[in-house]
Image: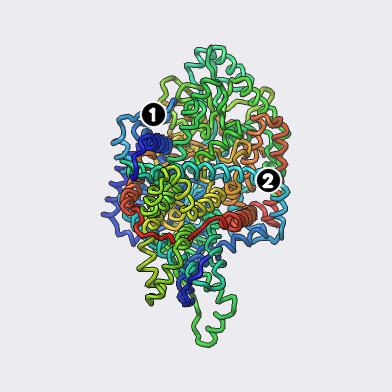
Amino acid sequence: MRRAYFKANWIAALLVAPQLLIIFVFFYWPASQALYWSLTLEQPWGGGNTWVGFENFRTLLSDAYYWNSVRVSFVFAIASTALAMSMALVLALFADRQLRGYKFFRVGMIWPYAIAAPAVGLAFRFVFNPHAGILSYINEVLPGFWDPTVNGTQAVIMVVVAGAWKSIAYNFIFFLAALQSIPRSLIEASAMDGAGPMRRMRDLQLPLIAPTFFFILVINITDSFTDSFGIVDVLTGGGPARATDLLVYKIYADGFRGFDYSGAAAQSVILMVLVMALTFVQFRYIERRVHYT
Amino acid sequence: MIERTPVLNALTHVILVTGLLLLLFPVWIAFVAATHDMTAVNTAPVELWPGDQFLVNLEQAWAISDMGTKFTNTVIVAVGVVVGKIAVACITAFSLVFFNYRGRMLVFWLVFITLMLPLEVRIVPTYAVAANALSPFQAMLDATGLTALIATLSGVQVNLEWNLLNSYTGLILPLVATATGTFLYRQFFLTIPDELVEAAKMDGAGPIRFLIDVLIPLSRTNIAALATIMFVYAWNQYLWPLLIITDRANYGMVAVELGTLVPDQFTTGGGTPTWHLAMAGTLIVMVPPIVVVVLMQRWFVRGLINTDK
Amino acid sequence: MTMKLACSVAALAIAAAGSVGAQDRVKFEYWYGLTGDLGAVVLETCNRFNASQDKYEAVCIGQDGYDQAVQNTIAAFRANQHPTLLQSFDAGTADLMLSGEFYPVHKLMADTGIEVDWDDYFPGIANYYSASTGEFFSMPWNSSTPVYYFNKDHFAAAGITEAPLTWEGMEAAFYALRDSGQACALAYAPSTWIDLEQFSMVHNVPVASNDNGYAGLDTELLFNTTQHVQHMENIQRWIGEGVAQIRTAQSGMTARDSFVSGECSIFFSSIADHNTVHKLAPSFAWDVQIIPVYEGFARHNTVVGGASLWVLSGKTDAEYEAAANYLAFLATKPEQQFLLENTGYIPVTKSTYDALLAEGFYAREPFINRDIAMKSLTYTEPTNLTRGIRLGSFIQIRAEWVNEVQAALAGQKTMQEALDTAVARGNDLLDRFERTYAGKTFP
């Protein structure tokens, strides 16, 4: 890729040192202790532990419900990422056209990201409530059709929509920033050549924001695997009948709430390996198609 | 704009307005809930139009939650986190993109992996580090026998201790590391053409000069986007402050205070569903992030320098 | 009430600042889980305690939920930064008991020379929080037990004169309500606490072997073999026939919301909700009744729910003395009454209850009939099966039950299959728990 580099590597080392130091102290050191528990049965109050080797992993991998969690997590990650990215991209492309009042739109679009978690849960409960919410109107036409408390598929849809909702705002702001850094001169030159706005979006703007697109893709996939327990906890509690039991929610429920530190640690290891593999695949196969300069 | 496109303009408006309505609908619900009294909020069907209790609820939420002093604390922490994150992300990515050394990929992955294990999972050992941030180094000295060696040679017993509980440092420092920010900056720096670097080297500018004079001005919109996101992120921090701040009077954060407004929802029940107050509190807490979003608008300006080849 | 609280907090803060230099007082920390208006009540007890004397100062810190309170305390404990007092819920206590990292309140009170009449506590509460020898581990405070709430107007319209005490009577009531035009008779939310744990208590049937776990760690779950199965099958049938409808927080409306809005006629919950329903001011007459039993079973006592206060190890004698005084303060009649007046909880000692009865406390709105909970708790002397439940990994076992019952209600399997699976998976969890604490026993 790049051919021109600075030579003074001691400066390079100095520049990465602060971040590495912080993550060593606040992430790797504690995380390694937590991960060690995956090979033991750890007593929560620190009374000691018993070495059990890979037993925690064997238990998980031989559990059909655990594989169900893996499947649900993939469905959730793919669906919410696709929804959040496509919505955000369309909105950003149009907001970037800078028609009158666009500043107001920008503030409005980012708003959902600023709202605190308890309000999100309450608001979505109102929206999805089968008896009195917005979707209860479906039930007036088709009685009993919408009921995410019994129907697992509908519960997944609910969690996907709520999860995507928050990411749209996040994606929007980065897409918009990328679109805004495309120089006006390029767009004007392209317009001069007779390219209409839609064609400019496709042929000029989209390729130019590919690096940001890739960034958002990787972050969205990663976040949907590792940062989605809040939404699940508020909306479904993993149910009905484990339909929305995401891997990270299970870790949270078992480890944080149920004090099974060893089981949660083993699940964390599996989740990390899974997300790392996914990220690696994305860097290996998708980043190749991104042109940076 | 560049040309007249009335149809497309109309479509643009339709898409943006629809998108905005969809995105803001839940916010509207929260607002409506904050304008009714408790009975109305808890009855079906859901109210869709505001009631007349807004000011009453705001006042009551403000009075019982003691938000006042918490705002200052949270601003200090959020600004600290934003500045720290942007600085750390910028210099890390700069090092990764503009230098060629072995281990670059390793550093990138080490930073990136931190996204993959949420705090909830590692909360117990992370708390131990916050209680003594130097404990990892002490443990390493102990393990390698250096503590004993130093004690024998100089008679000094090494006992490293740095307690971060109940301090701004404890609230800010662990949040300063940022995989997202580093990744974003990497993506941006990769789009900087080689010619710019060559030109800078020709002028005899060193790497730091290049970073300050060329890259930072170019990355303005990225900084604005990252700052907006990170400010909101820091503002809404909940679990970490809840854990490490027991001196709530001096170091309390707003999200934790908001948590105390949220009604109790446990199996044995008995809490009053004061969602109207929780929602009023949510709106109060949401004001500063929105102000920041509005202020950051100024930075979203069309790039002036052609970075393309 | 919240405004009143806020004002008195401010007044007390001024009073406290004026009276004594805070540095002279012995401070101790208390981490609690309750939030919302209940959390405000906890904080108020601390203010009241601090204003009542000038030797000790309670520093009370809300941790936003029982599970977070326990989790954060564990994290702090392992770094030796933990509080002296912890408010812990039932499911969090098995680990704490086996760790041994607590100071039994019975011993604490004896060591600090504070006299407590332990026999004054209701047996349904005492047994839950004490060793087999009868010594209290933790201090009962916010206590409740389940009842059911019913719409008197609906009952009258359906010609039901007496709130049923048997499930057979309950079923008849469901159909009478339906025939009177009431679409939703029972607002149902799956709850292990009510459907499994308290249900097994009143029927005197086991949830698990070893006297529900009290007698050892090598415990096996038994609830797939008892009347509980029949009961869950009945609930499934009632839902299928439409007389019962699922109303959970996840569906946007809790069972309580559906009841208060007049949509459903009956819901089961803790007596603590008595206060909440009053505050929500439904537009109809309503009352509470003790939970039903099936015909052919002799009714037994229910047990206490809620949380209790644990004293943790590793603190100084001065802090223990301060904490002991706070606990003794909470147990006094005025303080119990303060809790009762501001929440829906129940008295924990017989003397307080008797005094309140004598004063006509329970003859006044909004407290009328709230003491039906005492009838439920004291219905019989606790047997080996109705002392309570002491299981490890209890939170996960409850989750297994909920998930499997949901699977049965969604028609994925029969109720018997669902409960069999929940028991098998729960037993695996119990086995893991036993091996985690190899060689240890409940004190």
Residue B172 in view: yes
Q: Is residue A32 above or below residue C299?
A: below
Residue C317 in view: no
Image spot of residue B71 (x, y percent)? 32, 52
* Residue at the front extreme of this rendering: A193
User: Identity of the amino acid at label 1?
Assistant: Leu
Residue at 53%, 56% (x, y): give it. A290
Could you say which quadrant of the image residue A198 lies in? top left
- Left or right: B277 in relation to B144: left
Tag of residue C220: none
Residue at 53%, 26% (x, y): give it. C267
Image spot of residue C318 (x, y percent)? 44, 61
Tag of residue B48: 1
Residue matched to label 2: A67
Image spot of residue C156 (x, y percent)? 50, 13
For disc 1, the chain is: B
For disc 2, the chain is: A
Pick whichever, C347 or C366, lies toward us.
C366
Residue at 27%, 50% (x, y): give it. C14
In space, the residues marked 2 and 1 are separated at their CA atoms by 41 Å
User: Identity of the amino acid at label 2?
Assistant: Trp
Pick whichever, B222 or C287, lies toward us.
B222
Display coloring:
rainbow
- Left or right: C357 in relation to B150: left
Secondary-structure class at tag 2: helix
